[in-house]
């Protein structure tokens, strides 16, 4: 998977929100770019990952980061028009309602805010199968075709949608899984 931070053109002083921040790696990479005048907020739905991320932030001395519990489909715990950039790394595929997820990112972005998503797309729809733990962990479960993924972003009202990177990932069960980085603007 490609790191969305590498494609987000993050600048000093900006507010970044990482959706599905896990242990905080992309949060910390972003924090180094926004410096002390900026802020990075990591959102995760699991207490274990939030605890790990907070521990990592404290251990590494980050003072410009914050971690909040939230679910992208039910509402990101951030005010409207707060963030300059929304990033996510292989998380959207795990949502059931991708349009709702993208609408939440759109909601928290300021006017002309940027979204950079790294995820997986497939040559044929996969669907969400909570019994297939291996596919869920590898972000394959719930994958859309590239066309449907982009359609979901467009339906959330984003504009200037572009594919920044596209790399074959794996072949499985008669389908091709591709790693993709997509940029869009509010």
Image: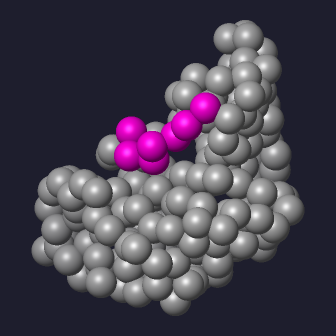
Give how far across and how far down residue 32 sits, in percent: 58, 23
Q: Is residue 137 visible?
A: no
Q: Is residue 138 visible?
A: yes
Vertical side of 14 occupied by 158: above or below:
below
Vertical side of 11 occupied by 144: above or below:
below
Q: What residue is at 56 percent from the left and 84 percent from the top?
A: 157
Magenta-highlighted residues: 6-12
Q: Is residue 97 left or right of residue 166?
A: right
Give how far across and how far down residue 135 sits, in percent: 39, 60
Vertical side of 99 occupied by 129: above or below:
above
Residue toward you, 159 or 95 = 159
In reply to whether residue 8 is colored magenta, the answer given is: yes
Q: What residue is at 38 percent from the left and 79 percent from the top?
A: 150
Q: Is residue 96 left or right of residue 124?
A: right
**Overall secondary structure of the magenta section:** loop
Give how far across and how far down residue 176 sits, in percent: 16, 68
Q: What residue is at 53 percent from the left and 53 percent from the top?
A: 88
Give how far across and how far down residue 38 sits, in percent: 71, 33
Q: Is residue 24 left or right of residue 128?
A: right
């Amino acid at each position: 998977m490609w790191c969305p931070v590498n494609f987000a053109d993050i600048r000093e002083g900006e507010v970044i929100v990482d959706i599905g921040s896990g242990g905080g790696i992309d949060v910390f990479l972003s924090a180094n770019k926004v410096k002390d005048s900026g802020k990075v907020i990591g959102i995760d739905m699991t207490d274990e990952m939030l605890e790990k991320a907070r521990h990592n932030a404290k251990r590494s001395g980050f003072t410009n980061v914050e971690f909040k519990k939230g679910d992208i489909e039910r509402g990101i715990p951030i005010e409207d028009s707060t963030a300059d950039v929304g990033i996510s790394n292989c998380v959207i595929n795990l949502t059931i309602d991708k349009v709702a997820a993208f609408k939440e990112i759109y909601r928290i972005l300021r006017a002309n805010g940027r979204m950079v998503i790294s995820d997986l797309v497939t040559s044929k729809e996969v669907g969400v199968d909570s019994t297939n733990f291996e596919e869920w962990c590898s972000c394959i479960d719930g994958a859309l075709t590239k066309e449907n993924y982009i359609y979901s972003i467009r339906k959330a009202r984003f504009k200037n949608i572009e594919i920044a990177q596209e790399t074959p990932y794996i072949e499985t069960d008669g389908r091709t899984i591709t790693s993709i980085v997509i940029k869009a603007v509010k």
